Image (cartoon, helix red, strand yellow):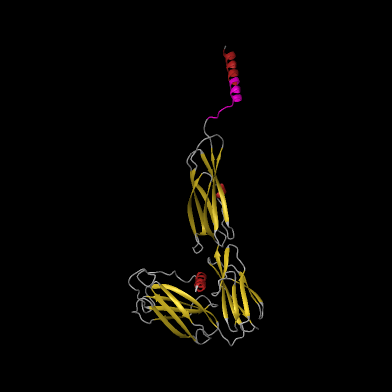
């Protein structure tokens, strides 16, 4: 169930079609697909949907009206061409299970990995207040076929259109190895044949993209380093999603105090403003501009985490806001062009505050002696001139 939910989240990020779920404390809190039967092509499919309000933290039970069911073949585009509105008992309150049996002669007419999702509504016609949406994946196999199919797709949380190389390697069957280049708009279907059912094991892996953390989701095992399919039967379909999570860049600003000489105490508290453009403040956020106030005490550093744009146009600048004394001259020229690009773990700069001593300089004993001789000489010249 964990990987099913995970895959749904990733497909949602790729599709950019699904609005965020909204919870209402005085309504139902969740919708979950309890089970989806695995059947052959053209046969019936049983979908059980459960609606409940156990996490609402309210005394009155929720009133369930209807549930909207959608399903699609994963290898198709991100639309849901088949859907239906369930309406079993609009007056039922609290926990409720609804099981529907569908005949998919017109819809599920080919083997493959299918996605079904459900969302409950307060009205009996799939309108009104909405509960949370749930999603589940299921295989439709065809034992009459002598091959296995493996669909590989890629998801970038920031919708990067970059291409990724994906490879399937098998212990038997033909071909043993296949490689394709895919992006988030174009998946690939690997077909493996000439094997005995139950003896085929295959692994799908993708290459890493700089600036992203790569994991693999297949809805079956807990190994994020690859999609592993074991004991595959003829006619079976499978799905592997290469998930790319945007990695952050740390922007570090340092403060350094420099004195031009002399012992003098000065308040070494300072403030600066860090401004960034075309960045994300979280891996799921949209591109935006943001500003942070930085506070320093003596020689100090402040850090901010940002998520760069795949377009390569992320930029940050730092400007000193104020200092404690007019004797302090800040230099923030090192911080005017910071570029937190993809694949760069950190960028840094330093603001230098120079303290200029404004007192009368003291002379050494040799300087005093020289000053005395000069004054005596000037006095002697004045005496001769005016005497």
As rendered, which of 240 and 310 lies closer to the eye?
A: 240
Instruction: Where is residue 165? Give x, y as percent.
Output: 62, 70
Image coordinates for residue 168, horizontal then vertical, percent:
63, 75
In magenta segment, residue 178: no
| Residue occupying the point 55% across, 49% down | 335
Rendered view: 373 above or below 124 = above
Main SS, magenta region, reads: helix
Above or below: residue 110 compared with residue 372: below
Report the quarter where the C terminus lies: top right
Q: Is residue 363 found inside the magenta-colored segment of the image?
A: yes
Q: x%, y% of residue 375?
A: 58, 20
Horizontal arrangement in the rendering, residue 126 relative to residue 338 (left or right): left
Tell me where the magenta segment starts and ends, as one range.
360-373
Along the line of sight, which residue is nearer the eye, 163 or 231?
A: 231
Could you tell me residue 181's position as x and y percent?
62, 72
| Residue shown at 60% from the left, 63% from the top | 210
Residue found at the very far top of the displayed protein: 387
Of residues 384 and 45, the one drawn nearer to the viewer in this rendering? 45
């Amino acid at each position: 169930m964990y990987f099913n939910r995970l895959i749904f989240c990733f497909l949602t990020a790729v599709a950019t079609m699904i609005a965020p779920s909204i919870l209402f404390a005085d309504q139902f809190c969740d919708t979950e697909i309890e089970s989806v039967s695995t059947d052959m092509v053209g046969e019936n499919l049983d979908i059980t949907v459960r609606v409940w309000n156990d996490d609402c933290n309210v005394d009155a039970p929720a009133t369930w009206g209807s549930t909207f069911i959608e399903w699609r073949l994963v290898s198709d585009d991100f639309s849901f061409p088949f859907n239906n509105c369930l309406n079993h008992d609009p007056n039922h309150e609290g926990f409720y299970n609804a099981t529907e049996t569908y005949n998919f002669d017109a819809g599920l007419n080919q083997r493959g990995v299918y996605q079904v999702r459900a969302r409950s509504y307060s009205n009996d016609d799939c309108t009104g207040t909405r509960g949370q949406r749930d999603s589940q994946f299921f295989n439709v196999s065809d034992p009459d076929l002598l091959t296995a199919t493996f669909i590989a797709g890629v998801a970038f949380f920031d919708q990067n259109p970059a291409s990724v190389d994906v490879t399937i390697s098998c212990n038997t069957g033909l071909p043993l190895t296949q490689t394709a280049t895919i992006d988030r708009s174009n998946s690939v279907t690997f077909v493996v044949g000439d094997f005995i059912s139950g003896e085929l094991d295959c692994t799908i892996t993708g290459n890493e993209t700089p600036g992203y953390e790569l994991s693999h989701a297949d809805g079956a095992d807990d190994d994020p380093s690859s999609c592993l399919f074991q004991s595959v039967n003829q006619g079976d379909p499978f799905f592997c999603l290469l998930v790319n999570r945007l990695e952050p860049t740390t922007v570090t600003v340092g403060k350094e105090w420099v004195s031009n000489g002399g012992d003098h105490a000065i308040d070494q508290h300072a403030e600066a403003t860090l401004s960034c453009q075309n960045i994300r403040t979280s891996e799921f956020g949209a591109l935006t501009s943001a500003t942070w106030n930085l506070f320093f005490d003596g020689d100090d550093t402040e850090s901010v985490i940002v998520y760069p744009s795949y377009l390569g146009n992320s930029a940050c600048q730092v400007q000193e806001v104020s200092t404690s004394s007019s004797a302090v001259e800040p230099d923030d020229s090192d911080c005017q062009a910071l570029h937190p690009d993809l694949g760069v773990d950190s960028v840094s700069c330093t603001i230098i505050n120079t303290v200029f001593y404004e007192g009368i300089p003291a002379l050494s004993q040799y300087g005093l002696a020289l000053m005395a001789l000069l004054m005596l000489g000037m006095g002697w010249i004045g005496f001769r001139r005016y005497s």
